[in-house]
Amino acid sequence: MIELTDIRKSFEDNNVLKGVNLSINTGEVVTVIGSSGSGKSTLLRCVNGLEKADGGKLQIKDKIFSLDNISKKEQLWIRRNTAMVFQGFYLFNNKTALENITEGLIVVKKVKREEANRIGVEILDKIGLKDKKSSYPNQLSGGQQQRVSIGRAIALNPEILMLDEPTSALDPELVNEVLMLIKDIAKQKKTMMIVTHEINFARNVSDKIVFMDNGVIVEQGSPKEVIDNPKTERLKNFLLHINKKL
Ligand SMILES: Nc1ncnc2c1ncn2[C@@H]1O[C@H](COP(=O)(O)OP(=O)(O)OP(=O)(O)O)[C@@H](O)[C@H]1O
Ligand SMILES: [Mg+2]
């Protein structure tokens, strides 16, 4: 189980996270929705340690961390176990698809190259890119590159996989292949936290949807509860706005 308690973060006088509380059960998929600037990325970054929170606790299994005060060793453990996928793919351009996937295994997890390659090929198969093993990022489509970056994250076998708008930099015709891969991973009961603007995808893939507004979680629940029966005016307005765009 993963538990976030009272996570707070300000950038100077901009109070971005005002005490976020969230429980995620093992194997659960949680999607985070909310308007631009509501603090979704900052929340993921604070959990992962890319951004230092001003306060709050993170529990992963039986380990509890005070996010405003973590040691280097704890930081490394958290990074490894909360692998993150970003909107841009951030692959190593001078490494092949296989090498991009095995790099973290070899450098971070100290897995021997042979074993890393074996795992890497298995993952390439899972992400449907076995035949692209030796291709460099500039020889892959955007969708394929994003699948490699998801492969790289799952190679580390993190306790939770966090994805921040994994499809928003893709051309529309490439969005589906990445969403299908994420769905596939969800089916295998990987714990995930996904920030997305794809509301239909969120409905299909989520055990729980979380609506953030202005630095707090305003509503959370099943897709039925959150999307079909919003309780607050804030969420009703947000959904109206999204539907208008479709
Ligand atoms: N490194 C930073 N320095 C200063 N302010 C920041 C930083 N990162 C985020 N912010 C501010 O924090 C607020 C929340 O940003 P965040 O990126 O978390 O929003 P978001 O919900 O992910 O939005 P979007 O849907 O547009 O990605 C914004 O006001 C943003 O300007
Ligand atoms: Mg964001």
Image (tube, rainbow, N blue to C red):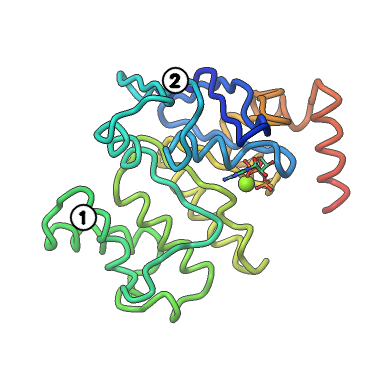
**Disc 1 designates what residue?**
107
Q: Secondary structure at mark 1?
A: helix
Dot 1 crowding, Cα within 10 Å, few <14, some 14–19, many 20+: few
Q: Say which amino acid is labelled 1.
A: Val
Q: Is residue 211 visible to the viewer in this orientation of the structure? A: no
| Furthest residue toward bottom | 139
**Which image quarter: residue 78?**
top left
Residue shown at 42% from the left, 38% from the top: 49
Q: Is residue 83 visible to the viewer in this orientation of the structure? A: yes
Q: Say which amino acid is labelled 2.
A: Lys
Residue shown at 36% from the left, 22% from the top: 65
Question: In the rendering, at what x and y percent does residue 22 appear?
Answer: 54, 22
Q: Is residue 32 left or right of residue 134?
A: right
Where, quadrant-wise, is the N terminus in this rendering?
A: top left
Q: Nearer the viewer, residue 182 or 136?
A: 136
Vertical arrangement, residue 14 with respect to residue 61, above or below: below
**Disc 2 designates what residue?**
57
Dot 2 crowding, Cα within 10 Å, few <14, some 14–19, many 20+: many
Residue shown at 42% from the left, 59% from the top: 149
**Which image quarter: residue 231?**
top right
